[in-house]
Amino acid sequence: MPDDFDFLAHEGDLATLIRNFDWAKTSLGPPSNWPQAVRVTTTTILQSPVPIVTLWGEDGIMIYNDAYSVFAGGRHPDCLGQRFARGGRRSPSSTTMS
């Protein structure tokens, strides 16, 4: 049986989380159905030392790298695979103006 993540050669914390995440519960669906562009983008960002997040599809499904996980702070790892509106933005009540 082919590995759904055969395109994911990178080893790291996020690569492991991506492999173990239930993508079928997202609008992206299982990785075996991901377009080539999503596979290439995911592989590319995981290899970067720079914080990168991609928001894929109409829902803006969040896929990011190890460096971004530090930037995400307390939202990580919960924001992986989430719609951007849910995982990426702070609610208006959690922001303050100086």
Image (cartoon, helix red, strand yellow):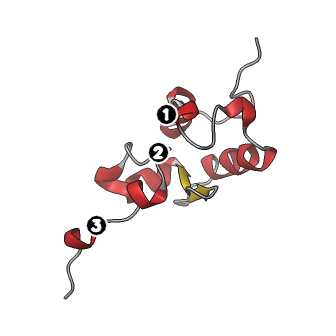
Nearer to us: label 2 or label 1? 2
Q: Residue 19: x percent and y percent?
A: 57, 29
Q: What whole-number distance in Å separates the C-alpha atoms at marks 3 and 2?
A: 18 Å
Where the C terminus falls, by quadrant?
bottom left
Which residue is located at x 67 percent, y 33 percent?
31
Q: Residue at x 42, y 51 (%)?
A: 69
Callout 3: few (<14), some (14-19), or many (20+) C-alpha neighbours within 10 Å? few
Question: Which mark's residue is nearer the viewer, 3 or 2?
Answer: 3
Q: Which amino acid, by three-letter code, is at mark 2?
A: Leu
Secondary structure state at the residue bearing disc 1? helix
Assign the N terminus to one quadrant of the image. top right
Residue at image mark 2: 80
Across and down, in percent, residue 48 comes to: 62, 54
Q: Is residue 91 left or right of residue 7?
A: left
The residue that mark 1 highlights is 17
Q: Is mark 1 in CB contact (under 8 Å) with mark 3?
A: no
User: Given the image, on which type of amino acid does mark 3 rest?
Assistant: Ser
Q: Earlier in the sequence, mark 1 or mark 3?
A: 1
Q: Where is residue 28 drawn, in percent x and y?
A: 63, 42
Q: Which residue lies furthest to the top in this view?
A: 1
| 29 to the left or right of 62 | right
Give the vertical position of 63 relative to 16 (above or below).
below
Mark 1–mark 3 Cα distance, whole angstroms, equals 25 Å
Lower position in the chain sequence, tag 2 or tag 1: 1
Secondary structure of the residue carrying tag 2 is loop
Mark 1 packing: few (<14 Cα in 10 Å), some, or many (20+)?
few
Q: Identify the residue at horizontal 63%, vertical 36% (top origin).
A: 29
Badge 3 element: loop
Q: Which mark is residue 91?
A: 3
Q: Are there few (<14), some (14-19), or many (20+) residues within 10 Å of tag 2?
A: many
- What type is the residue that disc 1 sits on? Leu
